[in-house]
Image (cartoon, rainbow, N blue to C red):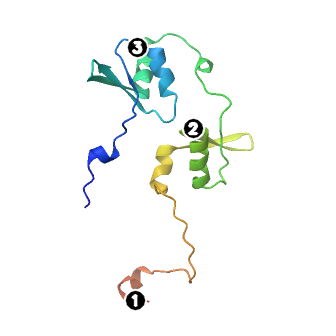
Amino acid sequence: MIEILVERVLTRSARTLRPETPLSEAAQQLRDPDVSALIVLEDEAVAGIVTESDIVAFVAETLEPHPVEAVMSAPVTTISPSESITTAAETMRADGVKHLPVVEGETYCGLVSMSTLSPYLSRRRLDIDWQDDPIRIDANDSARIPVGE
């Protein structure tokens, strides 16, 4: 296995804030699709980290009555069930969303998210133009697959 050092993959431009920063400002920064976490610095030392789930947990624990419409996103980017998962991923990226309701006409069918799509999509899209007959492998023939043909 090739060893890659953390310093080669870290994000140097990660956003930081101070412990006294208002929570509303942190929430505003987390709305940016490129920001998944905020590092809390006290002086130059890491004092904590704030993520979307931290803010959701805080709101859930305050139990103040707010209607869903006060926080919902609208209009909503949707996708048809007949579209490809590649199109779904490209739509998410272009619109900066992590979830797409699946609708047929006006009827809600379900939901796709980055996490449900990720097992099916490679990090880099490969376009392969196969110029030969399709490969067929029968479970009984697997020991007889010719190599190098």
Residue type, mark 1 in image: Pro
Left or right of residue 111: residue 30: left
**Residue that carries the numbered disc 3 in the rendered image:** 21
- Which of the two marks, 2 or 1, is nearer to us in this view? 2
Q: Is residue 81 above or below residue 31?
A: below
Residue type, mark 2 in image: Gly
Left or right of residue 104: residue 127: left
**Residue that carries the numbered disc 2 in the rendered image:** 96
The local secondary structure at tag 2 comes to: loop
Circle 1 packing at 10 Å, graded few (<14), some (14-19), many (20+), is: few
Circle 2 packing at 10 Å, graded few (<14), some (14-19), many (20+), is: some
Residue at x 44% of width, y 89% of height: 149
Measured as percent of width and height from the top left, residue 113 is found at: 52, 43
Distance from disc 2 to disc 1, alpha carbons, whole Å, reads 46 Å
Res. 146 mark = 1
Q: As rendered, which of 117 and 138 lies closer to the eye?
A: 117
Measured as percent of width and height from the top left, residue 114 is found at: 50, 44
